[in-house]
Each structure stands twice: as structure tokens, then as C-alpha cells.
Amino acid sequence: MASVIVVGGGLAGLVAGMRLQRAGHEVEIIEAAAAAGGRLRPLETDEGPLAPAVGEIGWGDANLRALVAGLGLEPSGEAGASRAHALVLGGRLHRPPPLRPSEFLFPRLSPRMDRPIDAVFRRPPRWRDRQVLVRALWD
């Protein structure tokens, strides 16, 4: 029987288990999924494997690469291969439509607002035109 039980085989659980084991404890890691790795593990989708957290965590970080190697794992996929966001539901990959500049900064309150906000980001040639467009947002 283990002297320490770690719940979760994601990155934090694996690191905790590794450090406890190196400190001389007998460790058992309990993971609900079929394989360890948590968000570092690729998701299987209808379009093939998708590594959802690689872009967020960043394989370019030397500390992360050393940590993963120390755990006996090998990173799969290409670092920075895809910066696109996607949602996986029921094993199917869903990609959001591209956003206009206004949608990054403002919620979509009404279709009427889309045109003036987008026009502001297109940089009208004269400052007076910009003021008119900004006032149109609040009318």
C-alpha cells in the first residue's frame, strides 16, 4: 500500500508524484481517464488528434520540456502548429467563425452597432469622421 496517494494524473499530479517519490515516499497516482497526461494529452476527434493545451502551455519553455522528459513522457505534435481555437463536443471538432475586430473588444449587442465599431477600427481619414462614428454608437 502506498504511503501517499495523489488524485489526478494531469501535469500537477504527475509532478507531485515524481517529487514525492524522489523524496522517498511510496506513491500511487489515481487517474479517472484511461491514460495520464491531463490537458497535455491529445484529444481524439473526427479530424484526428488535437493537442488542446500545447499552444497555451508552450513547448518552447525549457523548464516544461525538462519536466515532461523527467516524467518519462514525450511531447507529440508540433510546437505552435495551430493557434486556432476549437471546441470538441462528443469527439467532433467545431471551429468558431473568424471574428471582426469589434467582436474582440465589444460584445455583440446589436447588428446596428457592428458597422460603426468596425468603421472606427478601419481608421477613417479624418478625425471628424471618427468622432461622428463614435457618437453613432451612443445614439
Image: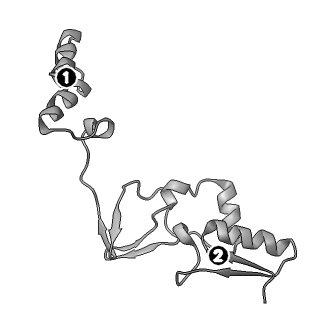
* Residue 7's disc number: 2
For marks 1 and 2 on the same chain, the one whose residue lies earlier in the sequence:
2
The image quadrant of residue 58 is: bottom right
Q: Quadrant of the N terminus?
A: bottom right
Q: Residue at x 44, y 59 (%)?
A: 81
The image quadrant of residue 13 is: bottom right
Q: Is residue 114 above or below residue 41?
A: above
Q: Is residue 73 left or right of residue 21?
A: left
Q: Nearer the viewer, residue 132 or 123?
A: 132
State yes or no: discs 1 and 2 in contact (Cβ < 8 Å). no
Q: Is residue 75 left or right of residue 110?
A: right
Residues under labels 1 and 2: Cα distance? 52 Å
* Residue 57's disc number: none
Q: Residue at x 19, y 25 (%)?
A: 137
Q: Residue at x 20, y 11 (%)?
A: 126
Q: Which residue in the structure is indicated by mark 1?
A: 138
Q: Amino acid at mark 2?
A: Val
Whether residue 76 is visible to the viewer of this picture, yes or no, is: yes
Q: Is residue 46 left or right of residue 69?
A: left
